[in-house]
Amino acid sequence: MAFSTFPLRTLAVPALFTATLAASVAAGPAAAAPTDPATSRPTSVAPETAKSPAGGPVLIGHRGAAGAAPENTIAAFKAGRASGADFIETDVQLSKDGVPFLFHDDTPARTTNVAEVFPGREDDPITSFTWKELRTLDAGSYFGQKFTGERIPHLDDIAKVANRSTGVYLEIKSPKNSPGVEQLVARKLAHDPSWKKLVAAGKVNVLGFDPSSNREFAALAPDIPLQQLAGTIPAAATLEDWSTFVDSVGTSYRTLTADQVGSVRAAGLDIGVYTVSSPETVAAAVDLGVDMVTGDFPQQAVRLQAGQAAFPQAKGLQIADSVNNPAGDDVQPENGEHVLVRNTTNRTIDASGIILRDAANNILTVGPGYRIKPHGELRVYTGPGTNSPKGYYNGRTASILNNGGDSVALWDARGKLQDVFAN
Ligand SMILES: [Ca+2]
Ligand SMILES: [Ca+2]
Ligand SMILES: [Ca+2]
């Protein structure tokens, strides 16, 4: 389908954002499909440059490219590099025996096969494992069969994937669980040849949520750009304090306001946002004028910034909405949380075997025999219910769609990315 049918769906969008997105997605011929009834977006938009006057924000692949490959693995780092993003982000921790490794969670349960290899240790701190033990874990198969054999990387592995185009955003993760990690990272960046090369090219940034850890790192490595992460932007006095040891603040795009962007800038700091995974949220961040955008789908963000279609393989199925927090229990018979999939074309599309994957890698699918009529919709539920032409039920017993906002990627049965929705 022509990408200019891209709907604004259900987000409330400021006019400037709409203009940016329209420019960003202007690609290919005008569409035959009608305007999305949920919005009033015109079917065709004048092609014009998508780049903001300043060239747009720095684009960063979250955990490599966590939407496209198992997070924080070599496969994800390579996908992030291939996307053309300015940086790939990762998380460093220390093993029980002091080896720096790249891993996000505090425990191995979600993203490894720990249950098979070390039964009973699923919820142990990841930092209670030795490096030898960590290397026996499979960190790829949770994401998909074809990634079986991906290992938890060593800190130095990402420096070998990065280059002068795609550098590293290195988060010091849960530093209280990894005593000494600040010194180790500072030493690496100063003395290891592959890190030194990246540092000299301006392609290494360090970041973290813990202000005391950041303060310590800043004292050890004052020349490395440093970012304070924060779930929400604090008061001016705190920003002022942070500005004595960091260069930028990174926060969730979900709560960031234009006023807060102003207060961060007033403290002399740059501003970044995470985890920005859909085209609409990337465009909204661009319109807020942020300096850095971190997301799970860097390839799509790069394409948008270049004025190209985010999903060149899209066949016409899109996510129209995600109902993360319905009235009553999120998982309840017939009526719980669900994702609304819409056929945006004039022809019937086979939705059998499509996959909906949320930011934490929970997966909903659609069974055989599901064909969505032209401009028709299918509700894909997390919980149990009676399948019908309008609804498919995954029969899960626990909620997966985060009520504080989530992102959902739609993959077709052949593994081609069709759409990403975020709220
Ligand atoms: Ca991180
Ligand atoms: Ca609810
Ligand atoms: Ca939910």
Image: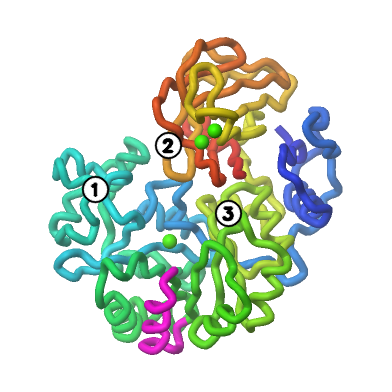
Question: Mark 1 to mark 2: distance in Å?
Answer: 18 Å
Structure colour scheme: rainbow
Q: Earlier in the sequence, mark 1 or mark 3?
A: 1
Question: Mark 1 to mark 3: distance in Å?
Answer: 28 Å
- Residue 218 lies in the magenta-colored region: yes
From this view, report whether residue 189 is shown above or below residue 73: below
Is the residue marked by circle 2 packed among few (<14), some (14-19), or many (20+) residues within 10 Å? Answer: some
Circle 3 sits on which residue?
276
Q: Earlier in the sequence, mark 1 or mark 2?
A: 1
Measured as percent of width and height from the top left, residue 248 is found at 56, 76
Question: Which residue is found at the position 68% from the left and 48% from the top?
Answer: 280
Task: Tell me if label 3 and label 2 are in contact, CB under 8 Å.
Answer: no
Please tell me whether mark 3 sits on a helix, a strand or a loop.
loop
Q: Please provide the residue range marked out in magenta.
A: 209-224
Quadrant that contains the N terminus: top right
Quadrant that contains the C terminus: top right
Circle 2 sits on which residue?
362
**Label annotation for residue 98:** none
Is the residue marked by circle 3 packed among few (<14), some (14-19), or many (20+) residues within 10 Å? Answer: many
Q: Nearer the viewer, residue 125 or 372?
A: 125
Measured as percent of width and height from the top left, residue 95 is found at 20, 64
Question: Which residue is found at the position 54% from the left and 68% from the top?
Answer: 250
- The quarter holding residue 209 reads bottom left
Q: Answer yes or no: is residue 156 visible.
A: no
Image position of 259 (left or right of 97): right
